[in-house]
């Protein structure tokens, strides 16, 4: 693990995303609350927050951080793409004040939320897939601000 003891504590914020691709009928069941396991997006939101908090347990070289905030939101696209799939874009933001960034916590939150959607919906759509798991932006620290190009 990298020694961050001499680094200045600054406010740090990172935002990541993941996209879940699914059949239109699956998205409709999610929207109508017809998935047997329960409220898919509510559970995925909690799972994403828990994932952010457990990042150092999953990623060996991550420092344990005192997160001051984690936010998970979802954007549903009901119009099927050229492959006939709808999507749910998960946006996860993590915040802390400290000597190291929260990029991995934000990316873990988005990934765990996507995995949770799959787990809750796999009985009706085993063909779901994920994509575009990436860092969208980050601020704070010595390296400053990063914004993913559009």
Image (cartoon, grey):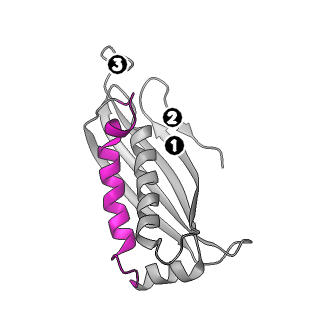
Q: Tell me if label 1 and label 3 are in contact, CB under 8 Å.
A: no
Span highlighted in magenta in the image: 33-62
The answer to whether 56 is drawn above or below residue 150 in the figure is above
Q: Where is residue 84, by image quadrant? A: bottom right
Q: Secondary structure at mark 2?
A: loop
Asked if marks 2 and 3 touch (Cβ < 8 Å), the reply is no
Residue underneath mark 2? 145
Q: Earlier in the sequence, mark 2 or mark 1?
A: 1
Quarter holding the N terminus is: top left
Reading the image, the residue beneath label 3 is 4
Task: Determine which residue is flagged by label 1.
Answer: 137
Q: Is residue 36 above or below residue 101?
A: below
- Picture coordinates of residue 142, whole percent (x, y): 45, 23
How far apart in space, not on screen, are marks 1 and 3 (Cα)?
Answer: 21 Å
The image shows residue 31 at horizontal and vertical percentages of 45, 81
Number of the front mark, 2 or 3: 3
Give the image quarter of residue 73.
Answer: bottom left
In the rendering, at what x and y percent does residue 36 appear?
Answer: 36, 81
Magenta-span inclusion, residue 34 = yes
Label 3 secondary element = loop
Residue 37, quarter of picture: bottom left
């Amino acid at each position: 693990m990298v020694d961050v003891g001499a680094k200045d504590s600054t406010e740090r914020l990172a935002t990541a995303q993941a996209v879940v691709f699914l059949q239109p009928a699956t998205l409709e069941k999610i929207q109508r609350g017809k998935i047997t396991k329960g409220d898919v997006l509510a559970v995925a939101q909690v799972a994403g927050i828990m994932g952010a908090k457990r990042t150092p347990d999953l990623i060996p070289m991550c420092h344990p951080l005192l997160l001051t905030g984690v936010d998970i939101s979802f954007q549903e696209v009901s119009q099927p793409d050229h492959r006939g799939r709808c999507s749910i874009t998960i946006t996860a933001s993590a915040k802390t004040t400290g000597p190291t960034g929260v990029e991995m916590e934000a990316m873990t939150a988005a990934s765990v939320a996507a995995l949770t959607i799959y787990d809750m919906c796999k009985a009706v759509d085993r063909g779901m897939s994920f994509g575009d798991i990436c860092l969208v932006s980050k601020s704070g620290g010595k390296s400053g601000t990063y914004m993913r190009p559009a």
